Image (cartoon, helix red, strand yellow):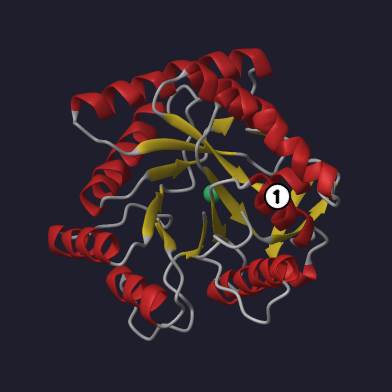
Amino acid sequence: MIRIGQAGIPLSCKGRTNKDGLVYTKQVLDLNAMEIQFVRGLFVMGDEEAQFIKDYSKENDVEMHVHAPYYINLAGDEETELSFDKILFSAKSANKMGAKTVVIHPGYYGEHNEKKTMKKIIKNTKKIHNMFKKEKIKVKIGLETMGKQKVFGDLDEIIEVCSNVKGTIPVIDLGHIHARGNGCLKKREDFEGVFEKLKPLKLKHYLIHLTGVLYENGNELYHLPIKKGDMPLMPLIDVVLDNNYNVTFISESPLMEHDAVYIRLQVEKAIMKRTGKEEADYKDLSEIL
Ligand SMILES: [Zn+2]
């Protein structure tokens, strides 16, 4: 199955609440995933809106995820408690909305070496998992692959944390992996390599962030529209379709839903190529499996 959506309230949606954004995502865009952004400080979501999102997304089969505030550091000394608060707050809302994942940026190496940072992040992620259990939060902790050298979270590191801590999944930000690897995702084999590395985690579903990205010396500078970046979509889509991977593509491009729709068109093009027909629906892969 392929799900597609965008991170945040669609730019073209007049209403500016998450509830408006969700309805628009389903009714106007005909997409079936959305990541709600709690990224500018702590965001308040009322119980009523959360309940609406839960019911609506369930009835209309839209998969929900939540992105916790950007500034989180599970490897720091002083910020850790504050980071726990931000994560717990986001996760409680996510739980109320029936979201599957709360996405977090794990942290920074700071003055610690990679090994020490890893230890701290594993220890603190375990603490978060225990807090979730205590609060009966059923949301998975999504650890995002990060696009800058000084930030913890290349693909191997994220996989290591996920293999050591229950209740976690990797959030595969391909734009970040591409930037950190100085443009390493170009060909089919490159994308196959990513899924190959993830194999030990035995994932049944992959949460994938997509955007174009401008980078320099293995560091992400900023996000670009997908077409302006140099990471091609087609080889990725081919790998996903050929292996029947269960994926959710979330557009994190500055063009947000426009690039989510672009992803959709590319997926449908790939399906049509396989069926030889002139129509396709990204939600129906029955003819090509
Ligand atoms: Zn992120």
In terms of depth relative to the viewer, which is nearer, 64 or 275?
A: 275
Report which quarter residue 48 is drawn in: bottom left
On the image, the x and y values in percent for residue 99 come to 32, 50
Residue 11 appears left or right of 255: left
Q: Residue at x 56, y 57 (%)?
A: 249
Q: Residue furthest left?
A: 48
Q: With respect to residue 22, does 117 lie above or below? A: above
Q: Residue at x 24, y 25 (%)?
A: 133
Report which quarter residue 30 is drawn in: bottom left
In the picture of the structure, the residue carrying the numbered disc 1 is: 242
Report which quarter residue 32 is drawn in: bottom left
In terms of depth relative to the viewer, which is nearer, 220 or 80?
A: 220
On the image, the x and y values in percent for residue 175 come to 70, 52
Q: Is residue 109 visible?
A: no
Residue 193 appears left or right of 88: right
Ligand 1 closer than 8 Å to label 1 CB? no
On the image, the x and y values in percent for residue 172 come to 60, 43
Q: Is residue 114 visible?
A: yes
On the image, the x and y values in percent for residue 157 come to 64, 25
Mark 1 crowd level (few <14, some 14–19, many ≥20, 10 Å Cα): few
